[in-house]
Amino acid sequence: MAKVEFDTPEIREYPIIPMLKSDAMSHSSPFVAKPTHQEPLGFPGELVEDWQNKAIEKMGELLKKYRSLKVYMDICVKCGACTDKCHYFLGTSDPKNMPVARQDLFRKVYRRYFTFAGKYFPKLVGAEDLTEEVLEDWYKYFHQCSQCRRCSVFCPYGIDTAEVSMAAREIMDHVGKGQKYCNEIIGKVHKIGNNLGLPGPAMKATLEDLEEEMEEDYGVKIKMPIDKKGADVLLVTPSADFFAEPHIDGLMGYAKVFHEAGIDWTVSTYASEAANFGMFIGSYDQMKKVAMRIREAALELGVNRIIVGECGHAWRVAYSFWNTLIGPFDFLDPKYPAPQHICEFTLDQIEQGIIKLDKSKNDHRVVTFHDSCNVARATRMGDSPGGQFDIPRKVIQAACNNFVEMDPETTKEKTFCCGGGGGLLTDDLMELRVKGALPRMEALREVVDNHGVTNLAAICAICKAQFSKVLPYYDFPMDMITSVHQLVGDAIIITRGVENKETDEQSETVTEQ
Amino acid sequence: MLSIVLAVMFYAATLVLLLGIAYRVSVYARTPAPLKIPTMPAPTTSGGVAMRLLREVTIFESLFKSNKWIWIFAILFHFGMLLVLLRHIRYFNEPVWVWVQLIQPFGTYAGFAMLIGLLGLWVRRVFVERIRYISGPSDHLMLALLSLIAGTGLIMKFVVHTDIVALKTFTLGLLRFDIQPLPADPVLVTHLLAVILLMLVFPVSKLLHAPGVFFSPSRNQVDNSREKRHVTAWANNNAGQE
């Protein structure tokens, strides 16, 4: 497939809702999964002969299994409240990227086969047969939804397009039209244990390198234990943290926090992945299978607690679904939430005074925070609603003197997706990713120009990878995107183990980039 | 003859409406919600969830966040209609309850609010490009039907009075299965036929949003997934215990 030429949208001072441009993104479609990606997950290798009937049969099954899908199909009144809420619509002007229009690609088929009105008066209610054309539209436009749930916040009935796009992807997988990126990655988790296909020895080598790097910086051995039986804490983090920038600086941040807190922790090579792409493809079975590795690793290592690293959808699966999928966690220490987010853990250590931060180490930075969609709209941290907004901010503010908020219409539960979530973080969707980032880039431009913001902090591996790629399109430096725990790691005062060393002035902080 | 036809139609429509909604609601209630998916931030107690739902159906909280124009017209229409419906209790009730008598003046003018709300929503449906794109024939017809009901009602109240005493004899008769003559007023008959049609389409149309909103998992679930294990039948939740 040839690379698509496209223009990066212009940043506007006062964003307005675009006029519709029909089919503006009808060329955007991710690579289709090959039989080698499909079959290991139990999906047919290619489009099955009887695909229409199979798809309708699967749709009927999902309507019986998911109340969300059934109710959402029936109760939309087409009020239009969601039509200007999707970042992909705002960035592309394609009407099929309006949440209700995207749902209608599914709903028109639902109506045709499952409702009285659609069976007998199809024209009247816009019911349509599931044709090849409709399937094509499904494949294109249900891969232009990052399942960020922003539409659900604004819908008077809470209709969540994510649920519909998950169902559509699940149906397509079952008739043999899966998406290569997601299904290939899930295959890697089953085979190797993480999305990146990073084998145990490579992980070990990476962590040893990082230990050496930190030892050079601090003159202290800050350990990054791996597969350590009997450790107190199992850290489950997205595998990008082991290898990508700026993720890896966040990983060192976690290690420094654990070190200062005196926590005996470990990562697992068997469950070396917090991400769970089973959610993106709407497959309960895959999601459960991927998550089960973590339960198994926790039992095998005999840990008392599980802490999850910086990752948006992973935190959704962990916080909202793990207890259902792989619980109960009666083998863990009931004193701590299961699972716990690394930000919850770090803030607790800061508030108890166990770890100390020197904010001035971040004085060369002006930081703003991007709420990741899954953390903001699908999870919580702490004890009260909204903790998912306050806790990461408190962590940042404990580590930095200069913190600025972006436009409140674009943060907290109204946050805009980075443009790469929901299984769309692939090069074959680059145009969509750049255009979908527009609303966030506009809000960022405003605080960069008016408040001199230098760093965009985030707690999601996908946001970090997406922004490093997309920021340059909008004339921002790609290393603006920063892990929250990099800020913590740069500010933390390492005291443990220091007295053993007679080294002088070792506390030079890492400030590369 | 007219009264018998209309009476039979009313009985049939009532049956369709009640059984239809009961069936749909029972389907929603029986369909499992296997995962915790409340839109966050969400209440952490069931009392909090009740309040969230109450706010959604009284002040249209999410819609207010979303779009002020749609919100204003939606409030005008729904609360106008609520008052109008309550006012109509007087036609089925003798002696008329005091509170029903008290809301009569508000109820009659609420008919205007209802109609203005409907027309406002309709204007947006026609002139706002995005909403025009997502509107189908049934969306326009639904507004037409409701506007017809509101319009004919207002005509009978403020322009050409119908024989309200005879009408009340008819409606009270309906309740006792004793069919009385209905005034052969074309405006009244149009009004009643439109209402019958609305009752018939209710269970097979988007009007299901009224009962449906209470079953929306993103709004009716408690945010307590870490504290309480959420279990449903098909999802075979015991596998985790092996």
Image (cartoon, rainbow, N blue to C red):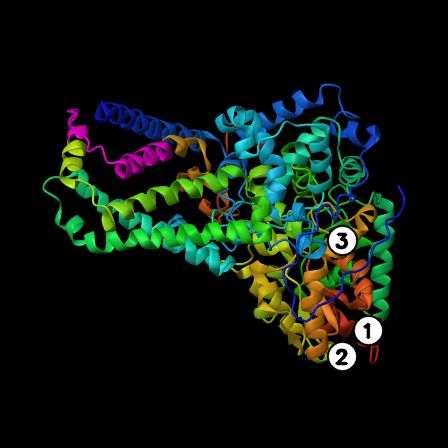
Q: Amino acid at mark 1?
A: Thr
Q: Earlier in the sequence, mark 1 or mark 2?
A: 2
Q: Is residue A459 above or below residue A401?
A: above
Query: Could you classify mark 3 by the number of other residues whose Cα lies within 10 Å: few (under 14), some (14-19), or many (20 or more)?
Result: many
Residue B185 among magenta residues:
yes
Residue A375 tag number: none
Q: Type of residue at label 3?
A: Arg
Q: In this picture, is A493 found above or below A106?
A: below
Q: Which mark lies nearer to you, 1 or 2?
A: 2
Q: Which residue is mark 1?
A: A511
- Closest to the observer, B8 or B208: B8
Is label 1 on the same chain as label 3?
A: yes
Looking at the rendered structure, whether the residues under marks 1 and 2 are on a common chain is answered as yes
On the question of residue A335 being in view, the answer is: no
Q: Nearer the viewer, mark 1 or mark 3?
A: 3
Residue A364's disc number: 2
Magenta span covers which residues? B173-199
Magenta stretch, main secondary structure class = helix
Mark 2 chain:
A
Residue A269 lies, in percent from the top left, at 78, 44
**What is the secondary structure assignment of the residue under circle 2?**
loop
Q: Which is more toward the observer, A117 or A451?
A: A117
Q: Is residue B149 left or right of residue A129?
A: left
Quadrant of the rendered image containing residue A442 = bottom right
Rendered location of residue A24, percent (x, y)? 74, 49
Residue that numbered label 3 is attached to: A433
In which quadrant is the C terminus of chain B drawn?
Answer: top right
- Whether residue B48 is in magenta: the answer is no
